[in-house]
Amino acid sequence: MKTPPIHRHLLRQITKYLPPDFIAQSPEMEDFIAIINQTYINYDKDAELFEQSAKLNDREYTAINLRIKQELERKQFFQAKLVEAIKQLSDNESSPANSEDDDLLGLLTILTEEIEFKKQYQTQLLEAKSNAELANEAKSDFLSMMSHELRTPLNAIIGLTYIMEQENTLESLQENLETLKHSTQNLFLLINDILDFNKIEAGKIELEKINFNFKELVLQIAKSFEVRASENLNQLEVLIDDNFMPNLISDPLRISQIINNLLSNALKFTSKGKVQVKISQIAFSNKISTFKVEVIDTGIGIDKDNFKKIFKKFSQADNKTSRKYGGTGLGLVITERLLHLLGSDIAFESNVGKGSNFYFTLSLPILSHSQTIDSHEIQDTYEEINLNGLKVLLVEDNLINIKIAQKIIQKWGVEVDLAENGLVAIEKFKANKYHIILMDLSMPIMDGYEATAEIRKTDKLIPIIALSASASFGYLDRALQIGINEYIIKPFNPKELNMKLHKYANFL
């Protein structure tokens, strides 16, 4: 196995402050070092996130370029008409006077139309240019704010690492680990916001059709926010109509994301108040349930002048808001786009100092009595399943990633075989029998694309799941085209991995 790519700064600290055998004798410290190392690596990928953000306004500039091209074509058309009119005047000098007057009048008409069009076009072009500049300004603000948001948890992680090195006590280790966990979760959510928005912009979101209990989903989401609500001394309530039919068919993951975003905002902007999630049944018809979901808070509210602004990408109601409360400014944009995919829209009412009410209406198919609820499909509430008997080939070149994945998978009773690159993976695949292959895409000697293509020449059926840190749609689309069944983005959610392993473990 190749030497793990431990970040140079982390390696220096480990060598300086820790005895040689300390990490190997402490599984907790080994896990901690793995998390910290991954954080250093993620920090180096900051530039990739900014590069993705910088591409988000390409459509606006493309539209302006198209308008300029159309204007040039129109200009050439009128120039040709003008030349033709002048030529006719020159050729018809001997014609009767009234004919010459008609030609002059036609020429003046063309020139007048051209001047008028030019004025209108210049006005439109100036307006488009102004909008593009505003979009660029918003993008710059967004990048500046994201730099702050990303570096804040990173600063906590790096600072706490130093403190832990100095204190070196078990009591402080446990306390600092909790803070580190909170910081890494915040960092993970920030990155997910950017990647989700990028995915929506590219039209890569496809909704699932899964049986689930909407009431249980909402209650579980609310439960996950109880600690956060108590931090600001808020009261969190869930009010569900007695007539509400909870067993529905839709995409619980995306619906959960919508409610999470709205509830997170409500709690963020409310202190010593109340936040309610309210579900009201509106109608039943043709096995379709129509109901209203409201997230009501008694927080700071939104000024009417900023009503439209909050649904623009990279924006919050006020720059002071983003500085005080944080956030990417993408939560409501993502929520709005997801609701559009579900055939709905977001609406709200708000008063400054009194609070806000964000609400939407959904019409979803009702689960019939003959169908069962696949509650295990909901990642947030999913209970991990034992996978005894499953044999997996893990193809990964990073030793830290291998240790993390191996410890997680073996917890479920899975037998794990390792391959450090695609070439070794092919050799092991030919010599052994596996139920599933977990394939990293970026590796030395032979990457996951080549290895998958080679395996697919002899086996079209074995499930291959990509574990990749790249969220670029070009790379992921290429992976699906060559035979990858599904992909999971690193850092991965263990519940998602368990769910997908169970999905493809047909013998279980």
Image: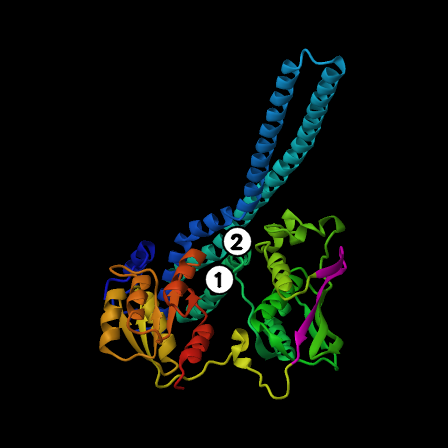
Disc 2/disc 1 C-alpha distance (Å): 11 Å
Q: Residue at x 44, y 75 (%)?
A: 500
Q: Which mark is residue 149?
A: 2
Q: Would residue 124 be found to the left or right of residue 433 on screen?
A: right
Q: Quadrant of the N terminus?
A: bottom left
Looking at the picture, which amino acid does disc 1 mark?
A: Phe
User: Where residue 480 sits: x, y (%)?
Assistant: 41, 65
Q: Is residue 391 magenta?
A: no
> Is residue 273 at all visible to an observer of this figure?
no
The answer to which image quadrant residue 29 occupies is bottom left
Looking at the picture, which amino acid does disc 2 mark?
A: Glu
* Mark 1, secondary structure of its residue: helix
Q: Quadrant of the C terminus?
A: bottom left
Q: Earlier in the sequence, mark 2 or mark 1?
A: 2
Q: Which residue is more in the foreground, 449 or 198?
A: 449
The vertical placement of 419 against 80, above or below, is: below
Using a 10 Å C-alpha cutoff, classify the residue at mark 2 as few (fewer than 14 neighbours), some (14 to 19) or many (20 or more): some
| Disc 2 versus disc 1: nearer the observer | 1
Which residue has dot 1 on it? 188
User: Where residue 429 sits: x, y (%)?
Assistant: 26, 74
